[in-house]
Amino acid sequence: MELKVFLSHRYESPDVNLYFHEVFAEVAAVQFDVDIGRLPTNVTRLERMIRDADAFVGIYPYPGDPGKRASLQELRDASKYFRLEMDLAIRSRKPSLVFFDRRYSQLFRFPKAIHAQAFDIQEIVGAGKSPQRALFRRTFEYFCEEVKATMAADLSKPLEAAHSEVGLLVPHSGVGQSVYAREHIEAVEEVLRNYGFTRMKRFRWPPELDTDYLTDIEALDWIIAEVGPAALDSGIVGYLHGRFVPSMRLQKAIDGNEEPTKSQNYPALYGGVEVGYRKDIIAWNDAESLKAELDMRLFALTAPVRRIGSRMDSEAYFREASLRREFVFLSYSGRDVELACQISAELKKRFQQVFDYKDGESITPGEPWLKEIFDKLSNAALGIPLVSLNYLQSGNCDHEAQEMIARRDSGKMSVIPLKLYRNESFDPPSWFGNRQYMHIYDYPDVPTTVNKLIEFFDRAMKKSS
């Protein structure tokens, strides 16, 4: 079975994520859409991602010491984003499955429609076999059957036109300070066009939920809606929220300083979670502030979603969180590429960013390659020249080595030269010769060499700090 799910998870818990990913992979070919959190939380984006998935899956560990008890407040603090995404999952009515750390049992309650299974974090990350693995697999199998049935039911429905319009539902008629003037409407439409949203539907105000109105709402891709007191009092905001229509929420600040949370109706819809809604509501008081805030939200909304397709992609994605963040610059002669590739591969198992000019990824196609090499070198925390006769006879390697040593001498990076071949003897340049070498042939294999190299790097970092 193949299915596409929205994955709600703690990125910094790779061991837990990998454990459950392996369980899932035994049952079905699962593609994950993930929001990796490098942009501000955008609720509209999350709503669209969940709407377009076949199902919702949550993996909710509690961080820190596996044997530590947690207070209710600590559990609430650690689960803020889990609870936001669970709020979205419940409203979406998608088939949903959550595996959660049993320490959350005193905090989490789930509707009957959601498959929820507690786990002991010490069993997941500890040594030895996991006694509950068979249970977790069965739970996922039952869940997949539900998803399969839901997908089949969806296929039996009449074909719908693709969601393509963006709705605009704001007070644009009548009198009073809450009414949007023509310049405000035009500001919204201008920003939408700048991001390629050219099909827009203006809804009449005040809203009247007749058949035409409801049909037009259901046809939308997403909607921009006022959520201030007048809109909340009309009932339309609650309707959109309950129907899980992806919404970008605005509030016109009448006195210039009005906070969305000051509305007496705010807690009923958005007060259940501490993150997401409050910062995501656009409070504005003139056309320029409205355009600026909309531009920021649309930039996040239209950012590419990361699709994790294959098992290899999944493992690479989940392991990223355990990789070190220091940028590594690997410098070597093309004649030593066979050994250099082994070293590069081991470094990439331990660091998120490793510059290797022959890996097909580190240099951007179409860019001036020499400039890009030195731009990357200027951002590196660790330089590793792979020293050999080939290296010392290469003009490009000579330039890279001199730049690394200059940056090392100015305290901007660490440099650890690695001599490749036992049977080579040479006199390195004077500016290079006083650096202490590591010898790859002093260690039994490449992984051990890289581990020792990292140990020396950590010592240098500790000494410099």
Image (cartoon, grey):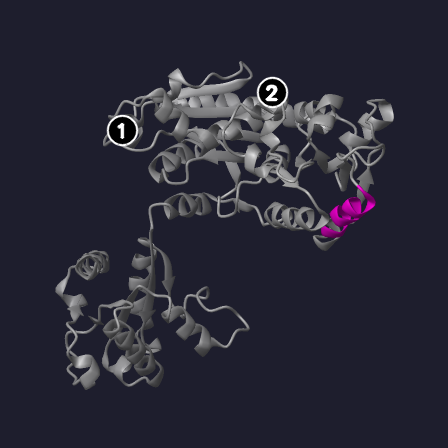
* Tag 1: amino acid: Pro
Secondary element at tag 2? helix
Count of marks placed on residues: 2
The residue carrying mark 1 is 66
Relative placement, left or right, of 8 versus 333 is right
In this view, the residue in front, 361 or 76, is 76
Relative placement, left or right, of 325 versus 193 is left
**Quadrant of the rendering where the N terminus is positioned:** top right
Circle 2/circle 1 CB separation < 8 Å: no
Relative placement, left or right, of 32 versus 434 is right
**Magenta part of the chain:** 181-191
The image shows residue 80 at horizontal and vertical percentages of 45, 30
The image shows residue 92 at horizontal and vertical percentages of 62, 26
188 in the magenta segment: yes
* Vertical arrangement, residue 428 with respect to residue 253, above or below: below
Which badge, 2 or 1, comes first in the chain's sequence? 1
The image shows residue 152 at horizontal and vertical percentages of 66, 26
Secondary element at tag 1? loop
Residue 144 shows in the view: no
The residue carrying mark 2 is 268
Cα distance, mark 2 to mark 1?
Answer: 35 Å
Which residue is pictured at 45% across the width and 73% down the height? 372
* Tag 2: amino acid: Ala
Question: Where is residue 387, by image quadrant?
Answer: bottom left
